[in-house]
Image (cartoon, rainbow, N blue to C red):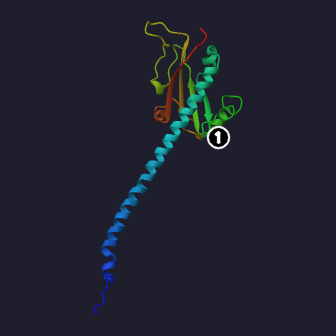
Amino acid sequence: MKISNDFPSRAERAFSLVEVTIAMAIAAVALVTLIGMIPQGMNTMREAGDTAIEARIHQQILNELQMVDFDTIHDEYHELIVYYDGQGEELGDSKGTGLGDAAEGMFEHIYSARISVPNPGDTLPPTVGGGNFDGIGFGDGTVNSEIRLVVIEVAAVGGRGDGFDWDLEDNEALISSYQTSVVKMGK
């Protein structure tokens, strides 16, 4: 009687050294590729976070401007710099009486915002083309005094002890600019 052996021999069950080496090489290439993508993913995530917070800061400033007396917007807000933390929350009273200039070098200061509310004849910020501002009109050549241009510039430049020069050409890439109009209501 012949005994049948249905189990393969030991040599038939194992991987060869060449097969194992090829599998490890494929895995190594895949891992190196994935690890190489991590820095780009981190940069993309940081940029998306900055964009979201900068848009939030813009909206906060715009909401505040809409609550201010229209006739005093230029006097109160033109060329005003405000400081924010990493979540886009304004640092104390960074508009003057509390933190003011001291906020610029603080560790908590992550974002800075400059508000420009130009009058006709003023110069526009370089991030929106610079040049002379002639006012807002509707094509007939007259300036409408019931509409104000508001330029809000936001930059993630916190903790810079040397300050931040908003008008320096090299810094324009760091600044997100938002142009908005505020309209006098009740007329």
Q: Closer to the camera, 182 or 8?
A: 8
Q: Residue 139, image x and y in percent?
A: 43, 9
Tell me which amino acid carries mark 1: Met
Give the residue at mark 1: 106
Q: Residue at x 59, y 13 (%)?
A: 185
Q: Residue furthest front?
A: 1
Image position of 36 with respect to 6: above or below: above
Image position of 80 with respect to 109: above or below: above
- Picture quarter with the N terminus: bottom left
Q: Residue at x 50, y 27 (%)?
A: 178
Q: Residue furthest left?
A: 2
Classify 10 Å Cα crowding around label 1: few (below 14), some (14-19), many (20 and above).
Answer: some
Q: Residue at x 52, y 39 (%)?
A: 50
- Residue 85, by quadrant, is top right
Residue 101 appears in the figure: yes
Q: Residue 140, image x and y in percent?
A: 44, 6
